Image (cartoon, rainbow, N blue to C red):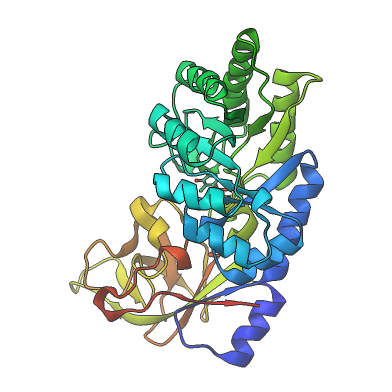
Amino acid sequence: MSERIRRFLEQQRPPTPCLVVDLEIIRQNYCNLREHLPLAQVFYAVKANPAADVVRMLASEGSSFDTASLPEIDLCLANGASAENISFGNTIKKERDIADAFGRGVRLFAIDSQEELHKIQRAAPGSRVYCRILVENTGAQWPLSRKFGCAVDMAADLLCEAQTLGLDPYGVSFHVGSQQTDLDQWDVALAKVAMLFSDLQDRGIELKAVNLGGGFPAHYQEDVEALPSYANAVMHAVTKHFGNRIPALMIEPGRSLVGDSGILQSEVVLVSRKAYDDERRWVFLDVGRFNGLAETMDEAIRYRLTTSRDGEETAPVILAGPTCDSVDILYDQANYCLPVTLQAGDKVEIHSTGAYTASYASINFNGFEPLKQYCI
Ligand SMILES: *Cc1c(COP(=O)(O)O)cnc(C)c1O
């Protein structure tokens, strides 16, 4: 936990559950990324943490933005981004939202289908389009496969048609899956992208950009490689497949920029057993799957926890949230252990919760409010 967050929690004692995000950590992460991938233009994936303070700080550092909806575009415009630094990166958009984005000055759009291409031709004439291709998400702890992207041969046809329709066939994108632990996945994806580039070159079209997507990790229970290893793997793959004709590079980090900046402070509501001979205790927190911890679905993302009783003897627990829905169990299979003396009222900190938490919280399920976030 950063010194600034520790001090904030000590001095302010905000009601729990709450998320405290250290903007200085995000700034540092952004600068590190720029330093290690100087050729890549950074488009922050706004959905990871759409707090206005986060967007404003990144805009002031010169970041561009990957957005998925008109409200996200307006959020960026209201907090210092200019329209030419915004990508409308969702491949599934209403035509009137495309038109409104175009009206606000956005000129960069993602596609992965012919119908979407035609919407953009009608609603955003002359714009740059990039086509997302399907790639394996092997090794990703939060895969995004299948729903987005199309096959390489289809992508080639779409980009050709884009040219015919008076659009600018700008490039190709992919996403190797979020919290990607296999550094070779960028090489696998870039091999496909390079084939697509040369195929289109044969058809008289010079693509200009490769969008490398997200996938860089935050620090959860499992160790991950450090950023320089990821940057090396990516640049090695780019050079291998493009030689000295490196296209413009875009990258869309979400989790790796904001994940480690946040601490979720929660409180134990109940510790219980369901039978006298139960081996494991149930620990119920005041935060769960519906008010911030959606990514515990299938126990995919395994956060690091600390408690006010660390150092004491520990034993296995099942960890659950406070709502009356039985899917609101955070960790059962994941073998979490917590201090045996833990009891109602004790604080539990959930680490690296700056990404995909507050923005995933439901409005009012069981009367629980969305997770409150403080940016400091
Ligand atoms: C969610 C998303 C990202 C961010 O991915 P991370 O793994 O969090 O970095 C990037 N690009 C697109 C298109 C996305 O949907």
Q: Is residue 355 visible?
A: no
Residue 125 position in % (x across, y down): 54, 36
Q: Is residue 162 left or right of residue 256?
A: left
Give the residue displayed 58% in from the left and 43% down from the top: 214
Vertical placement of residue 243 versus 230, above or below: above
Vertical placement of residue 323 versus 346, above or below: above
Quarter assignment of residue 343 = bottom left
Q: Is residue 148 visible?
A: yes
Q: Residue furthest left?
A: 275
Of residues 140 and 90, which is closer to you in this image?
90
Q: Is residue 12 left or right of residue 32?
A: left
Quarter assignment of residue 40 = top right
Quarter assignment of residue 321 = bottom left
Give the residue displayed 71% in from the left and 57% down from the top: 29
Vertical placement of residue 285 versus 117, above or below: below
Give the residue displayed 77% in from the left and 52% down from the top: 32
Residue 342 position in % (x across, y down): 41, 80
Give the residue displayed 46% in from the left and 56% down from the top: 302
Quick one: quadrant of the C terminus? bottom right
Quick one: quadrant of the N terminus? bottom right
Of residues 223 and 56, which is closer to you in this image?
56
Q: Residue furthest top?
A: 202
Residue 24 position in % (x across, y down): 73, 69
Of residues 372 and 73, which is closer to you in this image?
73
Residue 309 position in % (x across, y down): 51, 80
- Number of numbered discs on residues: 0
Vertical placement of residue 53 versus 207, above or below: below
